[in-house]
Image (cartoon, rainbow, N blue to C red):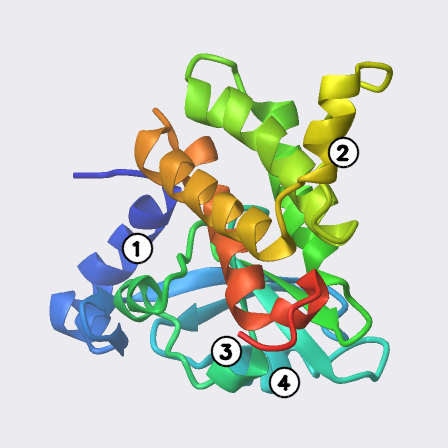
């Protein structure tokens, strides 16, 4: 079955060289090649066709040449704007579907965006929620409302965990604001919201938005004002 242009493009090679030759390229259950798009803060950006199984370190450092700024790489986002953020400590991860799924990530359309150590990962997590809120078709509640609440949550976490969504002028509201949730409570609520979006959204937009948010929380807790993970 021809599923998309990638499988269509593989057909001539398979017919010319044979299935065994095609299967010899790749890793595990992910066979053949994938066009990789290197972008962001990268010296050698562009489109590269590579076999599955190549590591992120080889992609970013050997092919991409490291950051354009010359500063250390802090994170790469794999799979497009809703892909997970991968830290350098996991750059030995083989680029294949199974390995990324096991690590809590996804390959998606194989776009890789590189960030140096000047990036604020809390802001990147907020961008993912804002992107979802803007792009949502509005059909399902987890995506439509969840992404909006996600932006508000991350803003409160960045502000120190004090709830700011109270209406001024009403005494009972001011009293409620004084007993605002702590930053730890807000982060726990954000994680719960991400799980709801992941499992309750009708399409991949709401279902994938939690990937960048949760990976930023897991790998870069200091940007959310946490001392450690």
Mark 3 vs 2, N-terminal side: 3
- Pointer 4: residues within 10 angstroms few (<14), some, or many (20+)? some
CA gap, disc 1 and disc 4: 27 Å
Mark nearest the camera among 1 and 4 is: 4
- Pointer 3: residues within 10 angstroms few (<14), some, or many (20+)? many
Left or right placement of residue 22 versus residue 59 in this view = left
| Residue bearing the label numbered 3 | 56
Task: Where is residue 79? Give x, y as percent.
Answer: 49, 54
CA gap, disc 2 and disc 4: 43 Å
| Residue bearing the label numbered 2 | 164
CA gap, disc 4 and disc 3: 8 Å
- Pointer 1: residues within 10 angstroms few (<14), some, or many (20+)? some
Secondary structure state at the residue bearing disc 2:
loop
Task: Where is residue 132? Give x, y as percent.
Answer: 58, 32
Left or right placement of residue 215 versus residue 180 in this view = left
Tally the marks. 4
Q: Quadrant of residue 184?
A: bottom right
| Residue bearing the label numbered 1 | 10
CA gap, disc 1 and disc 3: 23 Å
Mark nearest the camera among 3 and 2 is: 2
Mark nearest the camera among 2 and 1 is: 2
Mark 4 vs 3, N-terminal side: 3
Q: Nearer the viewer, residue 127 or 226?
A: 226
Q: Residue at x 66, y 36 (%)?
A: 151
Mark 1 vs 3, N-terminal side: 1
Q: Nearer the viewer, residue 207 or 79?
A: 207
| Residue bearing the label numbered 4 | 61
Mark nearest the camera among 2 and 4 is: 2
Looking at the image, can residue 177 be seen?
yes
């Amino acid at each position: 079955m021809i599923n998309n242009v990638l499988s269509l493009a593989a057909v001539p090679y398979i017919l010319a060289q044979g299935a065994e030759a095609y299967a010899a390229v790749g890793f595990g259950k992910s066979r053949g090649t994938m066009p990789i798009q290197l972008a962001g803060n990268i010296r050698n950006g562009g489109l590269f066709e590579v076999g599955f199984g190549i590591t992120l370190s080889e992609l970013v450092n050997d092919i991409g040449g490291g950051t354009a700024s010359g500063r250390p790489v802090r994170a790469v986002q794999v799979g497009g704007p809703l892909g997970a953020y991968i830290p350098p400590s996991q750059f030995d991860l083989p680029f294949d579907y199974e390995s990324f799924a096991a690590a809590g990530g996804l390959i998606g359309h194989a776009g890789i965006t590189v960030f140096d150590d000047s990036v604020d990962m809390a802001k990147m997590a907020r961008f993912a929620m804002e992107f979802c809120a803007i792009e949502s078709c509005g059909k399902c509640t987890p995506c439509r409302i969840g992404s909006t609440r996600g932006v508000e949550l991350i803003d409160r976490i960045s502000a120190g965990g004090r709830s700011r969504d109270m209406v001024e002028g009403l005494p009972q509201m001011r009293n409620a604001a004084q007993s605002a949730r702590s930053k730890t409570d807000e982060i726990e609520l954000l994680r719960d919201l991400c799980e709801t979006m992941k499992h309750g959204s009708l399409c991949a937009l709401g279902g994938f938005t939690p990937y960048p948010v949760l990976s930023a929380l897991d790998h870069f807790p200091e940007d959310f004002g946490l001392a450690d993970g």
